[in-house]
Image (cartoon, rainbow, N blue to C red):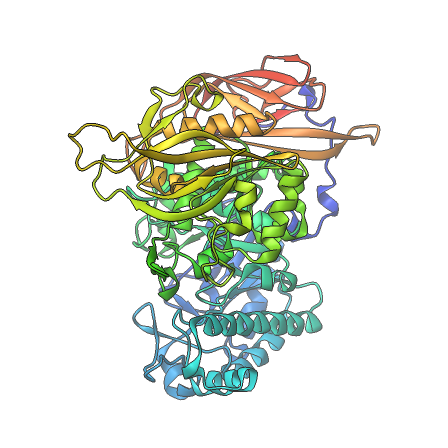
Amino acid sequence: MIALKARDESKGMNTMKMNINTAKWWERPLRISAVQCNYGEDSFEILKNTVVKGAFNTEQLLHLTAEGHMSFYEEELHGEKLDRYLAEAHKYNIKEIIYINVHCLLKKYRDEHPDWIQLDREGNEIKAYDVHYFNCINSNWFDYFLNNLKKLCTHDIDGIFLDGPVIASNGCYCKACQDKFFKLCGKSIFEASQDEMMLFKIDSVTEYVKKTSQTAKSVKPGVLIYLNNSALRADVTGNNTRKVEPYVDLLGAEGGFIWVDRNISLWHAGSMAKFIENQAKGKPTVIFFAGDHKPHSYFMHTAAETKIIYAQSIANGASVWYGIHGPTWMMNSPGGKAAIDMNKFHAANEEYYFKTKPLSKVALMWSMDSANYYASSVATSDFTQAQQVGTITRKKGNHYKAFMGFYEMLSRSHIQFDVIDEFNVKEGSINKYDLVILPTCGCMCDQTIKGIKDYVKNGGNIISTYDTGFYDQKGKFVGPERLGDVFGIESADEIVEYKIAGTAYQRVKEDHWCSKGLDSTLIPSPTLAIKTIPSSKAEIVSTYLEPMEGRYVALPDKSYAGMIINSYGKGTSIYIAGTIGEYYNEKTHPVLRQLVNNIVRRLSSPVLDSDTLGSVEFVLRYQNIEDVNCTSKKRYILHVINMTGDMGRPIEKIAPLYDVNVILHLDINVAQVRSITDTARYSELKFSQVGNEVKITIPKVDVYEVIVIE
């Protein structure tokens, strides 16, 4: 339970300061209210009773101009009412971001302008949400949109949110797209490959965002522009976050539109927040969190789920957009009340969420090339099929499942890590990490390959799995040779698939540091692996047994290299021949997590450790602050998110934990450790420090605890 008590300034809590008041308003921690429909409610009552009383400091305004769940700003219809609303909102110091739907249209617009609608390959109109129509950003609709945008920017608005833009996953074949594609590519759009269509969509969306931003800021230079970015998804809609980032002021992702069920990861929101922060290049970020339990727009999340999703977002450096897709009485539910409770806590402690940075020595790579051209559950296309190479059919892994498998293993092991992409490898910013993990990153361009080689050669360490780097950036198989000297393999030929459950095993070397804490050195192996020929200098630390004929037969005598350790330059590579990330994502064998934990802690500097449950997530961040003498110092904030609850999703109740021990490795002499979460129970915490090792015991952890260390 988060108790909203007044802070005790006598405890030294005001001895440090952040320059929060000098920042742009959108650089401060935001709590964005988004009532996503209006079926007859008074907008001014929504402002007073939901936005203001809910402790939001910003509103993404849709309900004022809404027709049910859809909202389209038109100057002649909405301009005067908008002025009155803005004046009222600004009295409460609420910043107003105007919602503009730029991805679909109501039937009445479609009837007036059929040339605005996206068409499939056969010329059929493409529906949105089964009842509306996707508009095409390449059509004359864009002129209509720009005309309204310019007029909108003459009002006293604070920002603009673009809902979309998107181009249908299989492409748009309207007349405007046909003409534009022919002009760019010199051939018919009907002759476009899937790669050409994807690049056409990316270029179209990027051009749209660029022109929109330039137009809005030419009329109103200080206006905020942002949209819903793609994040951990393939570029199926054309929205490539890296491409549009230069033209937006704030990056957001749908980390909180969650269909909570047995299959959803506990760390869904956190993974989005980590990745979007990496792509933001220092710009602020926000996680879009639907308070309603998707796909049910009129039914809310539980209080426990609400607090977890909210906490993962703000703990990982993001602000929160909290939206409901039904009447405002839904905010009186346990989930709605929990969101308001979190808002009030966030508002009372803004300074601890302002311009914080992660403290990580490990990076987990999300490969956009692999998401687009290899195999990923995020998007199914012709790129994801098995590929015939010579006489061998190369079974592909699943990059998204591999990524989420490693994400969970690291989180449950309490390892601090960042999420990176190819951009970081190419620019060399991975050099700040001790270890980079490449989870079935099948597709890589030559520049990415070179970046990884340089990183390891200069002392970096990597973990890679299955066919990482075996394909070029467009999904063409080119073989293991490009990274073979790093991995310590000479060739990789046969693919082994364990088709019968329970017939895949591996033996890990006894008395090796890799086997520390394992229940047995005979453990499950992934169900898809590659037979390699290791180089003579490489060390084989585990072997995969050949597939068994059934579960109840003797173990095979034959085996092949499973895990290979190889020195390359000053660094170390650990190559895992099987799809361990995908396998853990599906089976969650604790022994595999322990194996990965052993490797990660061996190859990276210690940051945090704890003896508590793996269902507790720790996020350690820091701020550069000034003391009373204007001397710059470092302050650490430890976020503790307890997801220990019902044995399933959605979680209804959280079991509190007591006397949670944490060891931190910090570069400051700690003077004080205190909780800002519940000052009714305790404030200052006992700690001990020897060198850079700081030991803290947290007396009680409910859903979310925040510890300040300085």
Quarter holding residue 592: top left
Quarter holding residue 669: top right
**Relative side of 442 to 667, left or right:** left
**Relative side of 234 to 219, left or right:** left
**Relative side of 189 to 451, left or right:** left
- Judge by depth and name the residue closer to the eye, 506 or 524: 506
Residue displayed at 33% across by 49% down: 259
Residue displayed at 43% across by 77% down: 135
Residue displayed at 51% across by 82% down: 181
- Judge by depth and name the residue closer to the eye, 486 or 200: 486
Image position, residue 228 (x, y; %) = 50, 60
Image position, residue 251 (x, y; %) = 57, 55
**Residue 689 visible in the displayed image:** yes
Question: Compared to 88, does 140 lie above or below?
Answer: below
- Judge by depth and name the residue closer to the eye, 233 or 252: 233
The quadrant in which the C terminus is found is top right
